[in-house]
Image (cartoon, coloured by chain):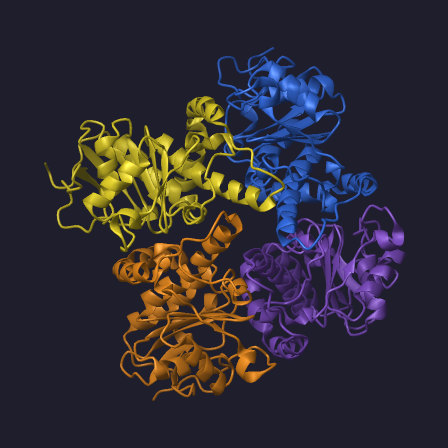
Chain colours: A blue, B purple, C orange, D yellow
Amino acid sequence: MPQNVIDVAPEILDDLVAANRILADQGILDAFGHVSIRHPGNPDHYLMSRWLAPALVTAEDIVEYDLESVALTHPGLQLYSERYIHSEIYKVRSDVHAIVHSHSPTVVPFGVTHAPFRPILHNAAFLGDFVPVFDIREKFGPSDMLVNRKERGTELARVLAKHTTALMRGHGDVVVGSNIQNVVWRAYYTEINARMLAQAIAIGGGPIMYLSAEEAVLTDASMQRVEARPWKLWKQKALGRS
Amino acid sequence: MPQNVIDVAPEILDDLVAANRILADQGILDAFGHVSIRHPGNPDHYLMSRWLAPALVTAEDIVEYDLESVALTHPGLQLYSERYIHSEIYKVRSDVHAIVHSHSPTVVPFGVTHAPFRPILHNAAFLGDFVPVFDIREKFGPSDMLVNRKERGTELARVLAKHTTALMRGHGDVVVGSNIQNVVWRAYYTEINARMLAQAIAIGGGPIMYLSAEEAVLTDASMQRVEARPWKLWKQKALGRS
Amino acid sequence: MPQNVIDVAPEILDDLVAANRILADQGILDAFGHVSIRHPGNPDHYLMSRWLAPALVTAEDIVEYDLESVALTHPGLQLYSERYIHSEIYKVRSDVHAIVHSHSPTVVPFGVTHAPFRPILHNAAFLGDFVPVFDIREKFGPSDMLVNRKERGTELARVLAKHTTALMRGHGDVVVGSNIQNVVWRAYYTEINARMLAQAIAIGGGPIMYLSAEEAVLTDASMQRVEARPWKLWKQKALGRS
Amino acid sequence: MPQNVIDVAPEILDDLVAANRILADQGILDAFGHVSIRHPGNPDHYLMSRWLAPALVTAEDIVEYDLESVALTHPGLQLYSERYIHSEIYKVRSDVHAIVHSHSPTVVPFGVTHAPFRPILHNAAFLGDFVPVFDIREKFGPSDMLVNRKERGTELARVLAKHTTALMRGHGDVVVGSNIQNVVWRAYYTEINARMLAQAIAIGGGPIMYLSAEEAVLTDASMQRVEARPWKLWKQKALGRS
């Protein structure tokens, strides 16, 4: 394989770059966090930027990895140390084709408290009726909090199980989706739901009326039909073009 | 009728486009939500954009609908699935000539708690002394949370009754007004009042001093006389021209 | 007197315009609120914009008023209905040479609760150890909440007494100063202190450590010596020039 | 020594200017606060801007000081009155090569409450398991709250002790680091951690799960290896170039 050439349609890389820029522009990703997609032509590979702030990613920075998170392009470049988040989830979740890891600002607080994180906005119905929390010290004891080894990624994937989102204590969250638009929607509305839920808890006045499990299933199906609308808007805002 | 031609003065469409842009620019509308006006020449028709993020709406995107929410222009284009919010309210509220449906970020939390949502800022006096909450499951059981069928719109209009604003559990709110400037004011200050009220509740220190019912009536009358001031400012900010 | 000519140095008008723009740019004023100065050559007159959003004010919009709030320039133009806030305070506070009335977003919540509003940031030391609340219904019963009559202004000035700031229930606040830079500082840091204090209350963990009365006096004196620093920054940001 | 010439590589001054601009751009510094570095060629001198809002600092404004905070360049110019914060810390902390003093907006509230300020985000691991609070009145009684005399700086340095951060009641905080990128990271994530922790406290639902002391040590070491990533992003955003 030529060193930095990835055998996918240019639109695929363009969308992956757009996802990085959109999530940075919307404040979901800061200088950290990463977005990946499963290789559309090879389910045992995935695509993700080299070590770079998401706001600065271009198509030239996209690296191809195998499912041991070994880079197959861009020899010698620095890589995200936490790429095992992605490879270990792709291994066990064949339904997942795109992943976002972020330090989403209002999601981190939910990961260090015991308040339930459940949807109160229809756009966040994908959260379902349970969002697990990955607390790295439960299995690994005191650590540097990073999923920078294969076994930590394996454990995170185990905790995520069949869900769409897992909180990571003292760190952030991981969100999985069926495609790039879907995962960007989910990363965005995970943060929006966190902001609204934090407000609702502070307002108080009685128990929060979450979406029920049944409502979440029905609503998520409807929401997946309108993902193109925010994508177009966000892309135009982040990139100056649609 | 020619396919996409609406028989109103250009200024009318211009104001409807401006309303979409203003509410997106001010963060009241995200990629979702919609703004409509009753057709000035035909009270049994209303005007609203095709399926599009409000920030991207232009005059060419405005569709004419009848009160069954059948599009009379723009054949074949995708439409907002929740247009029944608008038609069912126009049917029963002859005083209403403009409607905004939004996922106003700080209003959603009030819709999932039991704290009263009442005005604490004079600009929000139109909220009066009661804002109803539409909880879709009360009549329809588990659903996809969307007002995407005529009977759901009918029920929402019933809950709204004679009020200016109704919260929608897990979804957002609907605000009605007598004209486009009036409804933009109301959508904007519904959010501002929600932010201030959430703060006041968190500050605590005793019961909140809301505007009384009598104050709300007197103040709303005064406020309607100054609606042109923010409109001019917001329009300049959103469109770069007044 | 020629119709719209005010007999002051151009720099005076320039600073008054800058104050309007700065406070709008910093989010203290929205489309409403106003800034005035006492006429430097005639203590029985004051200067303030005609009816206009502060962000749009230019030197041509500055009107000269007497202390009955009668406009002496710009005949026939629409004026702020609440100009009595300014004239009634100038009448009884000879130390005051500049006034800001705003709907400062985080100050309004303090005006509808019973939590004490006192300084927790050294820059807000001017708040002293007491900030009165003007509740219009105490003297006038149910009203439209506006200080749009002389007697309401008189009462507000009475409640303000010798203080720098008064909260206005359901409305906003009024801040007075010895000159334009001083009053802009005070309007800005009233809002900043409100934000920080609301946070401190929510954080909890024991009583808030406010600045003591003695600290407030000592600190306010030091702060008045550095008012030129933010003024220069804010002006450059709001006007693109210093 | 020529009046305003500092004998360091231009890149050193460029980074110090960038640090001022970055922290202003990110909202950590407002018109106040300052950033200094120890002189790379002379550990008994330090470099910091003259009296100026950080957003406006250029290389020409950088002054060289000795450890009594006497300016050795720029004769006659106005200087920060609180420069003793810097000199007194440099005197006793040979490991410190860069210092930020700020009125970080969400850190101030923690300085006036008794809630513990500890890390809940891995990027803030440098906070360790204890952040001291400097309350100026404990040693000096009522004051103008400013560290504008040598003895006040000495006391602040004593309270800071071996820690990375000290809160200053009613004022702000001071953050120290091993180099300019390190201290900018720390000033930024002190604020981010404060925002997240305030949210976590408001969310409630049980005790906060802070990073343990052991986790903080391990995580801080890993974080120091990735400081170049946000620096590049922030610099590009603040200066329009990397």
Residue occupying image coordinates x 27% and y 75%:
C9
- Quadrant containing the N terminus of chain C is bottom left
Q: Position of residue A174 (x, y in %)?
A: 64, 29
Residue lying at the far top in this picture: please name it.
A1
Q: Nearer the viewer, residue D66 or B98?
A: D66
The answer to whether residue C130 shows anywhere in this view is yes
* Quadrant assignment, res B86: bottom right
- Quadrant containing the C terminus of chain C is bottom left
Residue lying at the far left in this picture: please name it.
D1
* Quadrant assignment, res A46: top right
Q: Is residue B99 above or below residue D175?
A: below
Q: Nearer the viewer, residue A208 or D106?
A: A208
Residue occupying image coordinates x 43% and y 48%:
D105
In screen coordinates, is B112 left or right of C9?
Answer: right
Residue occupying image coordinates x 38% and y 50%:
D30
Q: Position of residue A170 (x, y in %)?
A: 55, 31
In screen coordinates, is B1 left or right of A29?
Answer: right
Q: Position of residue C197 (x, y in %)?
A: 46, 55
Q: Is residue A152 above or below residue B231?
A: above
The answer to whether residue A39 shows anywhere in this view is no
Q: Position of residue D206 (x, y in %)?
A: 61, 39
Q: Is residue D62 above or below residue C209?
A: above
Q: Is residue D73 above or below residue B235?
A: above
Q: Nearer the viewer, residue B182 or D34?
A: D34
Numbered marks: total: 0
